Image (tube, grey):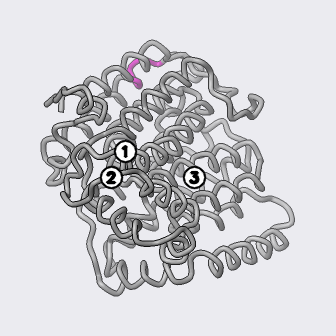
């Protein structure tokens, strides 16, 4: 578990070293390029997440999924999965010379590492671009480390890849790029179909021609549903709703989204955002609260939990602005930074020491270390 704390404190140091905000960040020219330092951190993230070995609660499930995928061609995978981009990635992953007899998959020739790394690239790039356009990028990254990076990105491989595209969509709509928002959400749905639910939220950011755009979104959603997701979504409905499954920790995760949602809605006018961006994040906050309250009446918490994962960037968005909301606007406000860092440290330690599933993350091992004959606790 040591490496998780080392990673967290490395980001904390960067956070403390970069407290001065850029309040005009959303007016900066929209670009998907990363600075050299951000690109270096992006590479480190991809290695840390993508080349993990037997880390994460779904490791065995993905081994089994690759084993089944090895019996199908690309067309069959797309039809079976309903997610064309992920199906193509999986089809290429099984072309590696892997051994699937053992659930550990030991020192295979790279199939599952390829799958994890591609999804890690999607996730890490989306996260880096999203944080780039927050007033305090490293504070946003600090908020992301305990749960979004360590738990979600290293435990929900496929959905983490989709979340990366969703964060690119969040960034696009914050700059008024509505068409790009829709495209990124469709890319996300091509990795994990549940992200399609984020598409209608674009309506919160629209001031004019809402009826026409609503019609276009309905048509686009229907076409995507019909051609790619119809059968698969039926399976999800049967598994998540009819089976009345419950997700361990769903209440805590939904609460973690509800807290920044309440902060944003209550102090909405204190956020220096234009009306379109403010309305969009108002919609996201309302959805986060709806999921929280639905938890108490829904027959299945899994469906709520899966949707809630796409709203985790709300925590980064709000927390990176809290120093200006409760401190002096535009100043360093170190006290607020330290309080948020302590909050993040509390989340990390609580999850590591008290979560019933954290044992699947400990010890952290990397495929690189196994190649080199190194094992760390």
Q: CA distance from mark 1 to mark 3?
A: 27 Å
Front disc: 3 or 2: 2
Looking at the rendered image, the quarter that the C terminus falls into is top left
Identify the image quadrant of residue 376: top left
Query: What secondary structure is found at the residue carrying circle 1?
Result: loop
Mark with earlier residue (3, 2)? 2
Q: Are marks 3 and 2 in contact (CB under 8 Å)?
A: no
Q: Kindly identify the residue that appears in the image at 54 percent across and 63 percent down.
A: 195
Residue named by callout 3 = 166
Q: Percent position (x, y) of residue 169? A: 64, 50
Q: Is 286 left, or right, of 209 in this rendering?
A: left
> Secondary structure beneath disc 3?
helix
Q: Are marks 2 and 1 in contact (CB under 8 Å)?
A: yes
Furthest-top residue in view? 17
Q: Is residue 322 above or below residue 308?
A: above
Residue 128: x percent and y percent? Answer: 54, 34
Badge 1: residue crowd in 10 Å (few <14, some 14–19, many ≥20): some
Callout 2: SS: loop
**Which residues are the magenta region?**
333-337
Q: CA distance from mark 2 to mark 1?
A: 7 Å
Tag 1 or tag 2, which sits nearer the N-term? 2
Question: Do the residues under discs 1 and 3 have CB atoms within 8 angstroms?
Answer: no
Q: Of the numbered discs in the image, which one, if any, rests on residue 247? A: none
* Residue 185 among those drawn in magenta: no
Label 3: how many residues lie within 10 Å, few (<14), some (14-19) or many (20+)? many
Let me know if residue 335 is in the magenta part.
yes
| Residue 263 is at least partly visible in this image | no
At 57% from the left and 73% from the top, the residue drawn is 75
- Which residue bears the numbered disc 1? 110
Left or right, residue 357 beside residue 329: left
């Amino acid at each position: 578990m040591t490496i998780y704390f080392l990673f967290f404190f490395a980001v904390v140091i960067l956070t403390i070293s970069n407290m001065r905000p850029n309040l005009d960040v959303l007016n900066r020219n929209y670009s998907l390029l990363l600075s050299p330092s951000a690109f270096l951190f992006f590479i480190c993230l991809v290695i840390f997440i993508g080349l993990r070995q037997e880390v994460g609660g779904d490791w065995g499930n993905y081994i089994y999924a690759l084993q089944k995928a090895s019996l199908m061609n690309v067309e069959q995978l797309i039809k079976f999965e309903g997610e064309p981009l992920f199906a193509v990635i999986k089809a290429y992953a099984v072309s590696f010379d892997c051994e699937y007899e053992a659930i550990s998959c030991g020192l295979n020739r790279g199939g599952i590492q390829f799958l994890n790394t591609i999804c890690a690239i999607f996730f890490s790039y989306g996260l880096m671009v999203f944080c780039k356009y927050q007033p305090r990028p490293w504070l946003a990254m600090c908020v992301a480390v305990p749960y979004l990076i360590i738990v979600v990105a290293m435990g929900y491989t496929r959905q983490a890849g989709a979340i990366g595209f969703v964060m690119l969509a969040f960034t696009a709509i914050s700059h008024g790029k509505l068409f790009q928002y829709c495209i990124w959400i469709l890319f996300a749905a091509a990795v994990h179909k549940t992200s399609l639910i984020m598409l209608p939220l674009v309506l919160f950011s629209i001031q004019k021609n809402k009826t026409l755009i609503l019609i276009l979104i309905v048509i686009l959603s229907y076409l995507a549903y019909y051609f790619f997701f119809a059968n698969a979504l039926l399976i999800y409905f049967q598994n998540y709703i009819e089976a009345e499954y419950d997700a361990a920790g769903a209440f805590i995760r939904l609460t973690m989204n509800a807290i920044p949602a309440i902060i944003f809605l209550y102090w909405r006018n204190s956020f220096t955002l234009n009306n379109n961006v403010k309305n969009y994040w108002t919609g996201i906050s309302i959805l986060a609260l709806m999921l929280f309250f639905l938890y108490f009446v829904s027959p299945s918490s899994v469906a709520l939990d899966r949707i809630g994962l796409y709203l985790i960037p709300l925590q980064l968005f709000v927390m990176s602005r809290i120093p200006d909301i409760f401190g002096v606007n535009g100043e360093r406000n170190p006290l607020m930074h330290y309080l948020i860092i302590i909050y993040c440290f509390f989340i990390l330690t609580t999850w590591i020491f008290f979560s019933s599933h954290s044992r699947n993350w400990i010890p952290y091992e990397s495929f690189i270390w196994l190649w080199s004959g190194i094992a760390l606790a």
